[in-house]
Amino acid sequence: MFPILQIGPLALQTPGLMYLLGLWFGLSLAEKFAPKRGISAETLYNLVFTGLIAGILGARLGYVFQYPNAFLASPLSLVSLNPGLLDPFSGFAAALIAGLVYGARKKLEVWNTLDALTPFFAVFMIGVALANAASGAAFGMETSLPWGIELWGAKRHPTQLYELGGAILILLALGHRSKDSSAPIGTLFLTFLALTAGARLFFEAFRGDSALILGGIRAAQVISWLVLAGALWGLLWKNNKMLSSDK
């Protein structure tokens, strides 16, 4: 865990830095990939920037609606840089809506755009894993295995490193998959979605901070199952559609 990076008198929040690096490297890779999908780098940057701003605002407002008393007691927390004061589901919903509105105005084809953004998503997931490793978030269950790490007063599974390794492997797999020019539009994004959901489904079993529902079911695994099923169905539909058009 390495939450603060001290550079002389300057103290940087390492998790936030990891997010920014993931954003930058992800956009840089997507910028090189986008022209193959007929999307300019400028359009891609504007789309991501629009979604990012809307996502941050939506995540903060979502958190405010859930915990209004905390902000009534300290109004300046509304502009806090603390990522712990963000609601990820509200942020994702706001970013998705903003992205769809922007894409509709620019007449972007949804599946083609998602394929163009897939390298960004994949690299950003690496940034998320590094941010969790720096902050100690997404920590693992207690373990006696030799590769366990000391965290929060106990020896735990290094789930942040598990997820980092998984994200790197997914990025490499997508790089190989992107070379298949005959694949239907949308399959690159659906492949990313399926691999990411499958990885989360597996690694969640080692997490020590899981939200439980219905007496012990891990909520993240339920969501992962649904996303995985939807992504696999989408891949099957895309491939069947391509085969039907070839006949």
Image: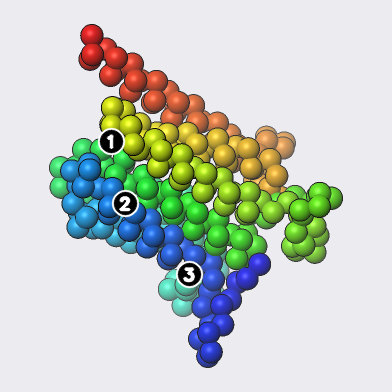
Three-letter amino acid code at disc 2? Ala
Q: Which residue is label 2 attached to?
A: 30
| Residue nearest the observer in this picture, 168 or 154 | 168
Q: How far is mark 3 from mark 2, CA to CA?
A: 20 Å
- SS state under label 2: helix
Quote the CA–CA distance across marks 3 and 1: 30 Å
Taking the spot 27% from the left edge, 52% from the top edge, the residue there is 32
Give the mark nearest the N terminus, 1 or 2. 2
Local SS, label 1: helix
Name of the residue lying farthest toward the top: 247
- Relative to 82, is 180 above or below? above
**Residue 15, position as x, y percentages in the image:** 53, 67
CA–CA distance between discs 1 and 2? 15 Å
Residue bearing the label numbered 3 = 17
State the count of labels.
3
Q: Residue 239 occupies which quadrant of the picture?
A: top left
Q: Which mark is residue 5?
A: none
* Mark 1 residue type: Trp
Q: Position of residue 157 (x, y in %)?
A: 73, 51
153 is higher (above) or lower (below) than 39: below
> Viewer-nearest of labels 3 and 2?
2
Image side of residue 105 versus residue 208, left or right? left
Helix, strand, or loop for circle 3? helix
Q: Residue at x 60, y 65 (%)?
A: 134
